[in-house]
Image (spheres, grey):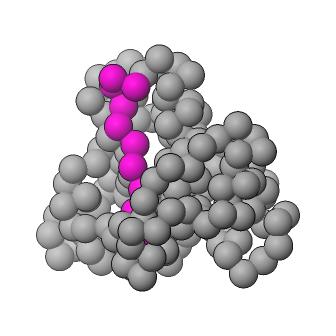
Amino acid sequence: MKKVLFVCMGNICRSPTGEGIFRKLVEDRGLLDDVHVDSAGTIGYHAGASADRRMQQAASARGYSLESISRQVTAGDLTHFDLVIAMDRENLQDLQRLGSENRDASNVRLLSDFLGDHWPSDVPDPYYGGASGFDYVVEMIEEACPPILEELLAAGDGKSP
């Protein structure tokens, strides 16, 4: 089974959206038995909380359900997951530091690595903005998820989905 983890700072906006969109993609392709998806935050401030209601609304409007419960990322996650997707460069640096203490963090990538050049390097945090910011994040993650799945499935076995 392949495993992917989406990571943002608090695990209530961007990373649960990555988890929800990716899970629907996996389900739509009939791969629920082959791919495990999860999300976490670099801080534990929101541990135990559901996704931000504004993000849930933006995702729901496009057919996605955000059901994850916030948790903080652990060093063990870097070993357990085949691919760890950081939402921005600050999250990436936090994960690389966590990895440098325990293991190679070469499986940690930016979400924007899977997007065209017309997208920004960082998925913007919509928490302090208006509704359009949440919609933009959903759009950005939607576009990145198919290439993420392709890479995840192709890794190590030479096959593409």
Eyeballing the image, is 33 above or below 53? above
Residues rendered magenta in the picture? 32-42
Q: Identify the residue at horizontal 69%, vertical 49% (top origin).
A: 59
Main secondary structure type of the part rendered in magenta: strand
Report which quarter residue 46 is drawn in: bottom left
Q: Position of residue 42 (x, y in %)?
A: 40, 74
Q: Position of residue 142 (x, y in %)?
A: 67, 43
Q: Position of residue 24 (x, y in %)?
A: 56, 33
Residue most extreme to the left: 102
Eyeballing the image, is 14 above or below 146? below
Residue 113 visible from this viewpoint = no
Eyeballing the image, is 54 above or below 159? below
Position of 66 compared to 54: left or right? left
Report which quarter residue 97 is drawn in: bottom left
Q: Identify the residue at horizontal 52%, vertical 19% (top origin).
A: 29
Q: Identify the residue at horizontal 30%, vertical 44% (top origin).
A: 82
Q: Quadrant of the N terminus?
A: top left
Residue 61 visible from this viewpoint = yes
Position of 52 compared to 102: left or right? right
What is the number of callouts on the image?
Answer: 0
Q: Is residue 131 magenta?
A: no
Q: Position of residue 27 (x, y in %)?
A: 50, 25
Q: Is residue 38 magenta?
A: yes
Position of 2 compared to 91: left or right? left
